[in-house]
Amino acid sequence: MTRPILATIHSAALSHNYRLAKICAPHSLAFAVIKANGYGHGLLPVARALASADGFALLEIEQAVRLREEGFAQPILLLEGVFSPDELPVSADFGLHVAVHSPEQVQWLEQAALSRPLTVCLKLNTGMNRLGFVVEEAREWAQRLQACPNVAGVVLMAHFATADEPDKGIDWQYRRFCDAVTGLELPVCLANSAAIIDYPATHGDWVRPGIMLYGSSPFADRSASELGLQPAMTLSSRIIGEQQLAVGASVGYGMTFCSDRPMRIGTVACGYADGYPRHAPTGTPVVVCGQRTRLLGRVSMDMLAVDLTNIPTAAVGSPVELWGSQLPIDEVAAAAGTISYELMCAVASRVPVVVD
Ligand SMILES: *Cc1c(COP(=O)(O)O)cnc(C)c1O
């Protein structure tokens, strides 16, 4: 028998969640965001589940080329554009869309010799202050790009910093964007998952759903199931050991958990080297034999401990779900003081993946 840890990718959930994004933004095309190896779900499993997506968006040109070689013909957007001028001819040969966020990237485009012109997404900084041109300069940069023979078309792109925080909202960025681009008559690409769900006015020509495709809620105050999303990954394992604790016995490194009564605990084949968060504290939910219980003590590299005291049927070999169909990843992330994005992306390469 092999080590029992497993990540199961649910293709039907991915396509369901994509359909939901399209229902939320019925008049827009959608770039399914599959950066970071499909948020840890695997580039090709996700792309295949979303084969009919209007487009894909990711970072590395090698992954974009991989998708073309696998036969994906829809627009593929490099979200950060090219990292060096030599990526431009490759982008042209494979018909990729490229973001353009810096004067250097504009110069590279102007100086390149390409097999065909590219569609570019002009990335505008509306207040996130990460990448992009100051939005008030949109007109000048758009004109310069439109005058470049290597440019087939310009799409205006910006990103919201607080679409997932209803008390902050996006008005402060969206107004700045609208004021700066009025009259430009160019296609627009703005909304991430949170804006797709909460801000229909921002949808424009293209939207960029990411986290919602994977069945996690972008919001702290609404669950994925309330939003109609289905989990796209189940991380599961099994109990591989069992211990009886006397009163006052401790569990794991650092003795951070001590029992105040006799307990039965199980050791699960999953640790931080599998991508499970080491900072998840005692009390983090775990499902054993379909029943909710809690993590105990510190997560080790290859193992973690769970409370089996109230699950008498649990024994060595019993199924454990760390997150997935029975346990929303958002609850595990909240308990560990992080967000689902980080947990998904951290699933380690040693964890076998099956696609259902
Ligand atoms: C990651 C990313 C998205 C997707 O965001 P979600 O919150 O996962 O929906 C959209 N646009 C850009 C530029 C991104 O980097």
Image: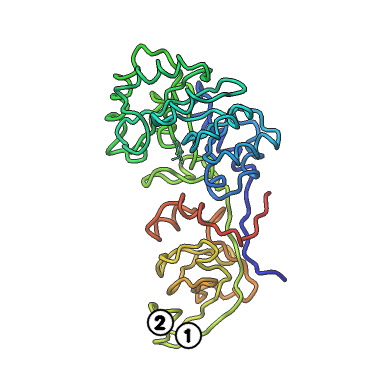
Mark positioned earlier in the residue sequence (1 or 2): 1
Q: Amino acid at mark 2?
A: Ser
Query: In the depicted view, which residue is nearer to us: 300 or 10?
Result: 300
Could you classify mark 1 by the number of other residues whose Cα lies within 10 Å: few (under 14), some (14-19), or many (20 or more)? Answer: some
Q: Are marks 1 and 2 in contact (CB under 8 Å)?
A: yes
Ligand 1's image quarter is top left
Q: In the structure shown, which secondary structural element does the residue marked by tag 1 occupy?
A: strand
Instruction: Please state the horizontal and vertical placement of residue 169, each as a whole percent of the image.
Output: 30, 34
> Which residue is identified by label 1?
245
Spatial CA distance of label 1 from label 2 is: 7 Å
The residue lying at 58 percent from left, 62 percent from top is 290
Looking at the rendered image, the quarter that the N terminus falls into is bottom right
* Mark 1 vs ligand 1: CB below 8 Å: no
Q: Is residue 346 above or below residue 10?
A: below
Q: Amino acid at mark 1?
A: Leu
Give the number of the disc on residue 105.
Answer: none
Query: In the depicted view, which residue is nearer to us: 309 or 63?
Result: 63
Q: In the structure shown, which secondary structural element does the residue marked by tag 2 occupy?
A: loop
The residue lying at 30 percent from left, 19 percent from top is 180
Q: Is residue 336 above or below residue 252?
A: above
Judge left or right: residue 104 versus residue 92: left
Instruction: Please state the horizontal and vertical placement of residue 143, each as a whole percent of the image.
Output: 40, 15
Instruction: Please state the horizontal and vertical placement of residue 298, each as a whole percent of the image.
Output: 43, 73
Q: Quadrant of residue 193?
A: top left
Judge left or right: residue 40 versus residue 253: right
Query: In the depicted view, which residue is nearer to us: 211 or 329?
Result: 211
Q: Quadrant of residue 122?
A: top left
Give the number of the disc on residue 259.
Answer: 2
